[in-house]
Every structure is written in structure tokens, then in C-alpha cells.
Amino acid sequence: SASSMGPPSMSVDGRGRAALLALSVFGCFLLFGTRENGRLQRGAMQTRMSSRILPVRLAVQPKFRPSLRNPEIDCFAAKKKKKDADDDEEDDFSMPAMRQPSPEEQKMEDAARKFINELDEQNKEDPIEIQDKFMLDTIKATEYGEKLFIEVKDGETDVKPSLPTKKNIMARAEEIANTVELSDLESNHRKMLTSLFPKDLEGNVVLVRADLNVPLKEDSDEIEDDQRIKAALDTVKYLMEKGAKVLVIGHLERYTSSGLRQNTLAPVAARMSELLNEVVTFVADCGGEKVANVARKMTPGSVALLENVRLVRTGDEEMDDALARELASLADIFVMDDFTDAHLNMASTVGVAKHASIAVGGLLVEKEMKYVDGAIQKPQRPFAAIVGGARLSEKYEMINRLLDKVDGIFIGGAVANTFIMSRGHKMGDSLNEPDQYKMARKLELKARNRGVKLMLPEDFLFANGYETDALTSSITMKSIEQPGNIPSGWMAMDFGEATLTKMVAVFKTAKTVFWNGPISAEEIESFSFGSHCVGSFMSAMSKANRTTIAGGRDTVAALGRCGAQDKLVHVSTGARSFMDLLEGKILPGLNALDPPEEIKIPLPDVTENKPLFDMELD
């Protein structure tokens, strides 16, 4: 019982003190009730306590157990009858005087009240921050008390919550949202093409900014990989079906020994014609009277590709306003479907969106937002992430943000080297970042505190050079932990079967799997085992109807080399845009589009406070 509890011992650790304090608070409320409506609440609490204690008393005193059939000899019934009579005589439902608390009980009550007062003061001082991923990036509700919390009617009594709840916070956020001008808000969540009515598109000229920067073969203008063209055609087909006149604009550049060179989009027009099985008119300009004449002659459902905007005009990357106005004047509607360049301020994206009558996101952008932002912000759980790459400094923000979302994360590639060496282990000449050791330890601590299972490789393939014919040796993590086992000149290039076995054993129950960054030097065939295994694992998870998402230029290239690019649920076309979106940054190319017609504020994604992946494997 509460009366038998003593004050917290000074020798108890932090968790013990917190547990004793919580029990003290509960015990004090049982004994003394609450201050509001004191007598009524003490009476209710005392009645509930008696009803629970009564069966125990009867059980431990069988020889004195009265006959419940005869109230006259039932001491418990007699006491209850007398109590009911006393209660009827008192209009204010007052309870009999309770005994004074002992010094120990008084000390517990004082400690409990101090704890409650500190918590109350903290809620007064700290603003409540609400994350809304559909429209408002952040709403800060700084009011406290009646202005923030909704009064809840309970009969004739107004009951005000003493602490914030999910329901009243979101209601207040919605109230604030209604007073905000939508166009003044920075957000990646903008109006999409599918929100327009068919009558808005039929017969109108629509300018589509697409990602057409495909890789070309070194010795010719022949297209080496047409994945970006295929990704852009979903929006083009949609517009054709709705009877729009479609103008497509983009850029194509390649690196040569003499530097960056702009290329004509004529090969892209030919490839688009083949994929659409329709004639795609190529216009050797991107504006002016020539394009205007082509647009006037176009029939509903036809397509024209304009020349590389950076080949025939200057000022695209410099956000030239004159160029933006010229491009915007070509069409009635602007569709931004170039997710790859959404992180940049360009005249052909941000500039056109600002001057266009209607500016919306295309189907590719909508898909990227659905999976990269939507599925990761509110994933099906358990949610697993696989992160690789060369430098932790480039991945820190993403990993830090993922730790707020995932249930388990595997770190591979040279990023894993930094984590391992931050623990004081030596890995020869393996690529790592000494200035990021502190950040690695910080991420490990965050994962531990949040109950996220963070895994590193169990075994490695070391090599004495970055060549196909280099000498190699398989080394376990236990060997690395022993000083002097890795000689200088040797580098970790890949991981082995033990790592794969553990990763699959832990993550096989995941319902959402995310991958960014190669986890081995897979561009060299001798060291491609790790990345190819992850690609195969992602493919297998897709076949099992799990949500699989991958992104990043090197990751997409690795998927292509292992033949798994088309087997995942979603492979992002973006590189820097993909990373910025994961890190929660605003993408200028999306922010410049028209805002949605309404603000949607979903309830926060609340999950049970327990790990969904086993922290230790049997």
C-alpha cells in the first residue's frame, strides 16, 4: 500500500529514483486525492479502494466471515449502511475526516507536487512544435492554457486538460492554419497535375519540364540508358489522353576531356517517338516565334520536344527572369516533372512556375513525393533502412533523420568504417573520416536511446589495392577488434556472408525497406558481392509484397548492374533532390508551384514505445 512506501533512497540509480517518484505520485493521489473538487474525488477514490480491498479481507479471515444473507450480523454491511446514512445527511457529500499523513507520506506528497509543478512550468515555457508533412512544414503553437486547449464539456462542468493532448493540439494547429496565406508558406507539398479537371487540359498548351539528361556513349550521341526518358513519359501520355497540346523542355549535357558540353535533344526526340509509338515533333529552338507557330498548328494529343534550353539560350542556371517569362508565355499550364533538378533554382523550373498562370507537379514528382516523402514519413512497420556510401559527412543528416523514423538500420560502405574506427579499432588504410568520429558516436547513442537496432558489418573483404587483381583476405569483426591484425596498405572493400546472413535474419520481417548508397566498392566486379546481395534482398522483398524504395545516383547504378532496378516498388530518379527531401529540406522547384486548395493536417504517427526488431539475435 502507499502508506508503506518510504522516501527514495539516495543510493538508487536514475531509473530507480524515477520509478519511486512515479509510485509516490500515484500513492499520494490514492491517499489524498486531487485538489479540485477535493471531497468528491476523495470519496470516489476511497469507495474504489474499499471495493478492491474487501474481497482480500474476507479471504484472509475465513473463521470470522459473516453471513451475507443476514445484514444484522454482517459487520461490513452494517458499516456500509451507516456510511450511506451519513452520506445522505450531508448535502456536500463530504467524507469523514481522514488521518493526517505521516512525515514520510508528507515528504512523498511534497516531492510529487514539486514534480508536477516543474512539469507544468516546462509546458508553459516550451513551445509545442507540430510537424505537418502535407502542407505546413512547422506550426509553432506558443499559447498556453485556454487559448491552446479546447474546453471539454462534462455535464455542467468545464474540464480543462492540464497537459497537451494529441486531439486538442491538432485542433489548435488547424485553427492557426486557417489564418495563414497558403502562398506565403514554404513547402514541398504543392498542387499536382491529377488535381486538375480534364476540361482544364483539353485543347490547352501544356509546357512540361522533364529530366532528359540521359547518359550518352562516349564516341557518339547514341543514348546509353533511357530510364529517365521512360520515367518522363507517364506525364506525357496522361496529357495526350486528356487532349492537351504537349510541349516538352529539358537539357542534355555530357562531360568531355575539354569540360562540360551541351548536346542537342534530337536523339531524345527520336527515342521518345519509338517509346510512344507516336510522332514527336522536334523544334530546334526553345522559344520565340518558331515555337509559337508550332504550338498554334498542334492538334489535341500531339507532342513536340523543344531544343536543349541551355544550348540555345543562356541564363537558365542563373535564374534569368527574361528567359523564364519567355518560356512561361509559350503555354497555358506549366507542369514541373523534373524531380532530379528540383533542388536547384533555375529559370526553366522555378522561374517559369512563378510566371505561369497555372503551375503544378507532374506524375513523376507526385510519385516521388508519395514514396520518398509519404512512405518514409508514415511507413508500414517494421521499417528498415540500409545506408552505405563513402562519407559520413554526406550522410549524417539523412541518417539522423531516419533514426526518428526507422525501427532498424544497417550501415555499410566506407561510412561503416567511420563508425567502427570511432570506437578505437584500427582498419589499416580503409577509407574513413576522423573528423566525423564524434558524429558517429552521437548517431549510435541516438539509436540506442530510441530503441533502434543499428547494425554494422560482421565480416569484411580486405584488399591491398583498388584493382581487380588485388590480393584479398576475409576478416571478421572480432579480428578487427584485436589490435595489430590489419596491416597498413590494406583496405575494407566489401562485406561477407556472415553480414548478409545477419541482415536478412533481422530485416526479413520488415514491411518497408529503404536503401541509399552502395555498401561495397561494387564498381569493381571483385568487390560487388555486398551491393549485389542488397539488390537481391530488395528484389525478394518486393516479390513478398513489401514496400521497397531506393534512391541516389550510385545506388541506382548499382541496381542496374545487378539487374534489380525494375524489380523494386520505387527507384527515385533524383540524386541531390532525393537526399534533400529525406533531410527535410525545401526543394525550390516544388515550392514555387501553386499551393494546394486546402491544408491537410494528419494526426501524428504514434507507435508503441518498443523496438520492432529484436535488439539481440539468438
Image (cartoon, helix red, strand yellow):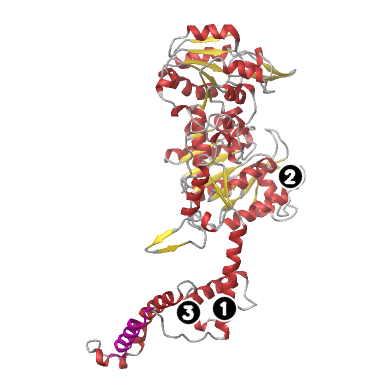
User: Label 1 to label 2, Cα distance in Å?
Assistant: 51 Å
Q: Secondary structure at mark 1?
A: helix
Q: Is residue 540 above or below residue 170?
A: above
Report the residue marked by disc 3: 31
Q: Secondary structure at mark 2?
A: loop
Label 1: few (<14), some (14–19) or many (≥20) C-alpha neighbours in 10 Å: many
- Relative to the observer, which residue lies in front, 44 or 298? 44
Label 3: few (<14), some (14–19) or many (≥20) C-alpha neighbours in 10 Å: many
Report the residue marked by disc 1: 108
Q: Is residue 551 above or below residue 399?
A: above
x%, y% of residue 33? 47, 75
x%, y% of residue 422? 71, 52
Was residue 448 drawn as part of the magenta stretch in this picture? no
- Of badges 1 and 2, nearer the viewer stands 1
The numbered mark, 1 or 2, whose residue comes first in the sequence reads 1
User: Label 3 to label 2, Cα distance in Å?
Assistant: 58 Å
Q: Secondary structure at mark 3?
A: helix
- Relative to the observer, which residue lies in front, 58 or 179? 179
The numbered mark, 3 or 1, whose residue comes first in the sequence reads 3
Q: Is residue 263 left or right of residue 69?
A: right
Please give the name of the residue rendered at 58% of the width and 77% of the height, measured from the top-left corner: 110
Report the residue marked by disc 2: 433
Please give the name of the residue rendered at 69% of the width and 33% of the height, measured from the top-left corner: 469
Q: Residue furthest right?
A: 488
Q: Amino acid at mark 3?
A: Leu
In this picture, which residue range is highlighted in magenta?
Answer: 74-91
3 and 1 marks in contact (CB < 8 Å): no
x%, y% of residue 139? 56, 46
How many numbered tags mark residues here?
3
Q: Amino acid at mark 2?
A: Glu
x%, y% of residue 507? 50, 48
Quadrant for residue 94, please give it. Answer: bottom left
